[in-house]
């Protein structure tokens, strides 16, 4: 459970702190095709990954399909001969969802009774 919370927080931090705008066109075109008005599409404000939405207390509604985008994930590699560690970024495909595809997380009944 602790690992999941850490993952969600990291996803939210990454979403909010990113500087790249390379996916904006794909995000805008993808959500316009889904019927979202262009003025309602605000990457890094109301468009996040599944885990980033969880990090702000929302969950993606069952059956929703997001927009696929490419992101770059920081990674490290250790040279087997020298032991030298090098950093690089690797491309990864991920899916983002608009706020209209989410709903507030509802606490489980057992949490409410406690």
Image: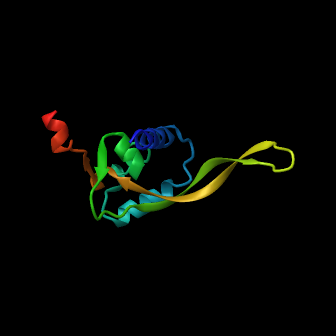
View extreme (right): residue = 81
Q: Is residue 46 visible?
A: no
Q: Residue at x 42, y 61 (%)?
A: 67
Residue 40, horizontal then vertical, whole percent: 33, 50
The answer to whether residue 26 shows anywhere in this view is: yes
Which residue lies at the image location 30% right of the left edge and 50% below the top edge? 59
Is 21 drawn above or below residue 70 in the view shown? Answer: above
How many numbered marks have been drawn onto this rendered protein structure?
0
Q: In which quarter of the image is the N terminus?
A: top left
What colouring does the structure picture have? rainbow
The quadrant where residue 33 appears: bottom left
Give the x, y percent position of residue 79. Answer: 81, 49
Residue at screen point 60% across, 50% down: 73
| Rendering quarter of residue 34 | bottom left
Who is closer to the viewer here, 35 or 75?
A: 75
Residue depicted at 81% across the width and 42% down the height: 84
Residue 25 in the figure: left or right of residue 41: right
Nearer the observer, 8 or 30 = 8
Q: From the top left corner, tell me how far across and down residue 32 is, in percent.
A: 36, 62
Q: Nearer the viewer, residue 54 or 31?
A: 54
């Amino acid at each position: 459970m602790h690992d999941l919370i850490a993952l969600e927080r990291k996803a939210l931090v990454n979403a909010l702190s990113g500087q790249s705008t390379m996916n904006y066109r794909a995000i805008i075109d993808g959500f316009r095709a889904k019927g979202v008005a262009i003025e309602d599409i605000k990457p890094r404000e109301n468009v996040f990954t599944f885990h980033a939405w969880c990090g702000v207390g929302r969950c993606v509604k069952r059956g929703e399909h997001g927009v696929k985008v490419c992101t770059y994930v920081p990674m490290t590699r250790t040279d087997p001969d020298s032991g030298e560690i090098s950093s690089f970024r690797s491309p990864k495909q991920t899916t983002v969802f608009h706020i209209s595809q989410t709903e507030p997380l509802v606490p489980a009944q057992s949490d409410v009774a406690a």
